[in-house]
Image (cartoon, coloured by chain):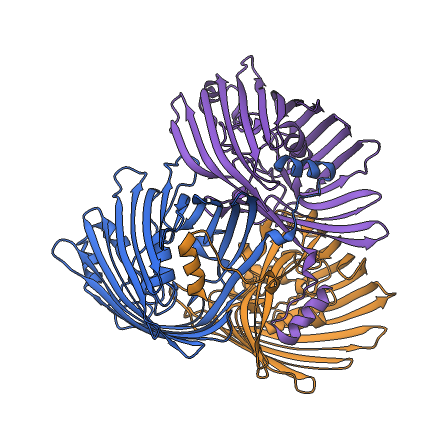
Chain colours: A purple, B blue, C orange
Amino acid sequence: MQKKLIALAVAGLVSVPAFAQSNVTIYGIVDMGYKYQGDNVNSSVKNRNAIDSGISGGSRIGFKGTEDLGNGLKAGFVLEQGILADTGTSDQSGRTFGRQSFVSLSGGFGTVAAGRQYTPAHAILAGNIDPFGLGKATAGSIANFYISEARLDNLLAYVSPTWGGFNFVAGYTFNASGNEQSPKLGGTSATDVRAWTIAPTYKNGPIYLAANYHKLDPLESGEPSTKVWDLAGTYDFGVAKLGAVYGQRKVDDVKVKQWALTGAVPVGAAGKVQASYGQRKVDADGAEPKVSQWALGYEHALSKRTALYAAYAQQNQNREQEAISRGDFGSDAKALFGAGIGDASDSGAAGYQRGFNLGVRHSF
Amino acid sequence: MQKKLIALAVAGLVSVPAFAQSNVTIYGIVDMGYKYQGDNVNSSVKNRNAIDSGISGGSRIGFKGTEDLGNGLKAGFVLEQGILADTGTSDQSGRTFGRQSFVSLSGGFGTVAAGRQYTPAHAILAGNIDPFGLGKATAGSIANFYISEARLDNLLAYVSPTWGGFNFVAGYTFNASGNEQSPKLGGTSATDVRAWTIAPTYKNGPIYLAANYHKLDPLESGEPSTKVWDLAGTYDFGVAKLGAVYGQRKVDDVKVKQWALTGAVPVGAAGKVQASYGQRKVDADGAEPKVSQWALGYEHALSKRTALYAAYAQQNQNREQEAISRGDFGSDAKALFGAGIGDASDSGAAGYQRGFNLGVRHSF
Amino acid sequence: MQKKLIALAVAGLVSVPAFAQSNVTIYGIVDMGYKYQGDNVNSSVKNRNAIDSGISGGSRIGFKGTEDLGNGLKAGFVLEQGILADTGTSDQSGRTFGRQSFVSLSGGFGTVAAGRQYTPAHAILAGNIDPFGLGKATAGSIANFYISEARLDNLLAYVSPTWGGFNFVAGYTFNASGNEQSPKLGGTSATDVRAWTIAPTYKNGPIYLAANYHKLDPLESGEPSTKVWDLAGTYDFGVAKLGAVYGQRKVDDVKVKQWALTGAVPVGAAGKVQASYGQRKVDADGAEPKVSQWALGYEHALSKRTALYAAYAQQNQNREQEAISRGDFGSDAKALFGAGIGDASDSGAAGYQRGFNLGVRHSF
């Protein structure tokens, strides 16, 4: 195919190949709203008012397609770009297709996919546990305190078929180095890593159960490994869907325990009340600084594609900042401490924070 | 919606959501041509011959869509990327959707839009006054001497309904700071700002009248505010459409007065002669350096989507360079001085410049 | 058109222009696979295992369209972005549409195109000679040793009509400088250049013959010119298509001679065996370091759009490294030495290399 395409180009230098356009579907979200952040400690940003992008769901544009190869085999691709629509720039540190970019082959054997993809942990939390969808900038998201790797570069992933509600995802990133841009953790500043991940899930009627384990081994010697496991589940009572998650992260000697309780209550045909409470606690050297957060939100669907949303959340940080400053946990510990409310890149310096947001999310 | 989409992704890790593709329209312009620039003073570029992008209109690709929400309410989005097609790079300093990126809700109340958007001033000048469409690289554009902010990040804009030909646009950018990329002026190197803008327009038959006021307050203390107002109008006599604009910009103590007279004359069904003359003058400290430019162009439509164009312009700069060098206007004044002919990023050092261009603009 | 579009925007500030979507075709490739590279000398990367993008063909997404202007005249555009799908970033050093971005006018006179485009040399090698399609990351590609400029910025190209199988391509990049991003060689670190290129080809039944000459004159004085010519041809015997290419590059005093023999053998309806052997030799100062490579591959089409591929190649480098280190060829010579197997950005330090890859290429 490649050769044929280029051959056409040679004939005219201005020709390029194309299959029927129906091969490609364009989709995305533009989510913009007002966001307020405030805190009571000596942060440089006491009160922040802003028009922000991606509050309840990251703004994005994606291109995807599938091809039926016959015999139950399918090929597919996804190229999805994160957008900071308030400034017209690319999200995920400026990557072009930083949200997802992979090719896949599916069949009776399951699905094999290669490229930049979500971690199973992220898929569990964002798709099932967090009623705010793990929106990275919303006040309500458990991502404001529950730490989790979002994506892996160079990931070779396998998704099993579903057997009576059970399936699993397994993934590996090879030991790339040299000129290759090696696997890096999505959204964190961690060093290059080789990653293993496995996540079984069970879904049957109102019940959803999931587990996740992943291990990140830095390619540079001297850097500590990160070992992560999470247990999660939800039960849909109809009048409300309740969920819970518990997880542990161990980086070198530092262990972080984190958990959340979540709930979503439908209100009429178009409304939904969202709530969550949770904590993150560091077990190290006797000191036990912790962060806790509660959040309440409401989302109102104007259509299947467009919704208005509002959320309020409050976060208390107990001695985290002073402990970090003192170096109680070593230099690695700093990377363990999450974001302030509604801002995953904040250093979490504040002892008390609250956030409010109000916006519109339009899918296409 | 968000949650449902991600839930799908969890099931397979490789699934992504999509609505019918008809939600999205792809549009754009690829504009390429030959450009000559020459000047008579000791600039490093005496004579420049080039194949350039975006001469009569910035090359771009955009994605947009609207959704009918019922009850007269509509949601919509625009993601528009500027392209330097001669080198295959992004325009607007490399931004992904640097031309426009916003979401909007429209109804009987008007339109509310949030994101990166044009300033009303730019819309007035580009869409109505400049017969060259404010093309940033064309020899003819009044943008070569008439200074105006093109876009604002983080803008919350309101567009009123039209009452008997009258409507207005109002906009505000919140006081964002901290980790947020704060509003910056499109196309200038100015500091982060909080911006106010209001622009009433009146359009009735052959008459078009518009006014603009905007104020840019830097977030960093010590930086001067910029206050801008413009008055503009056109009258369409049928055989010709004549226009005029007068504006003032005040940055700290430095006041800039600028004006232009413009005209467009249809020639047959497909042709159009474009002409403009104008000046920019600085009122400060007794010195009155000024720039004046005249331009003549012709555009020939090969179809509704494709046109050939040619333009010639000549610019005289009276003492601007030496005044700037002496520091007559303070360091802030430098940012007030516009571009050389057909090159908005040129420092405008030349005392005399002329430019010629010839190219093709293809819209899709 | 431009003015009308912007006029619409003025009315609402949120409107943008659009023609029917059928104007634009979206196409592309996502190519991902496993890649092994090994070598026997003191390189820092002895054994590299990775999941890589674009092995048998650069991953990409493109937008293109044509418009019938009547009277046999057509306008068209191509905007094509290279993608490193393993990390979700842009290829071609991060350029947005780094593969191709141009506008064209075609008619009985041929085609004139302006923008960033392939060199004729690249089109000849990739489309006709190399059975691996000059895939930049595949073990098999002759690009691992046969040096050739891939693209030119700011190129004004002319493609002649075809007379009895004969046609030619000619191109020129103007002497841009100043604020203009000047023509740079695609994929090399060379300085800004003004380029000339001409390439006649003949195609008739099983016969394909092509010649290429291009000259790159750096804009900065003191930099040496590069003069390149290539002769190439293939003959399709049906059971096999055999090809050959010979070329010379002269940079200042250093002359490089390079050649390759290639073959492709169809296996059944869906398979294809690919093979190539070739050398690059430097003629300078008595020293004659050389690189030779042989490659064997197999490609199996799952459909017209999707293929599996595998390739193995081995490369021997005779004294190149030591000769470069000694400075036998001057500092300019370093740029002449190509890549290691399957990695065009490798410095070619190794004396012996081998590579293997296995992957899937999905076109859309």
Quarter of the image for residue A166 reads top right
The residue located at (65%, 73%) in the rendering is A10
Res A338 visible = yes
Q: How many marks?
A: 0
**x 78%, y 80%: residue:** C206
Query: Where residue A292 sits: x, y (%)?
Result: 54, 19
In-image side of B146 versus C157 (left or right) = left
Q: Residue furthest top?
A: A286
Depicted B8 relative to depicted B343: above or below: above
For the residue pair A275 and C173, the one nearer the viewer reads as A275
Which residue is at the far right?
A: C268
Q: Is residue C75 left or right of residue A160?
A: left
Give above or below for B35 relative to B205. Answer: below
Q: Residue B47: in sight, yes or no? A: no
Location of residue A96 in the rendering, given as x and y in whole percent from the top left corner: 56, 49
The outermost residue toward the bottom is: C164
Tell me which corner region of the image, top left, top right, bottom left or bottom right, holds residue C349. bottom right
**Residue C341 in which image quadrant:** bottom right
Q: Quadrant of the N terminus of chain B?
A: top right
Q: Residue at x 62, y 22 (%)?
A: A262
Q: Horizontal and vertical percent for residue B275?
A: 32, 72
The residue lying at 76 percent from left, 40 percent from top is: A158
Q: Quadrant of the C terminus of chain B?
A: bottom right
Q: Residue most toward the front?
A: B164
Q: Position of residue B214 (x, y in %)?
A: 30, 47
Vertical side of B130 occupied by C74: above or below: below
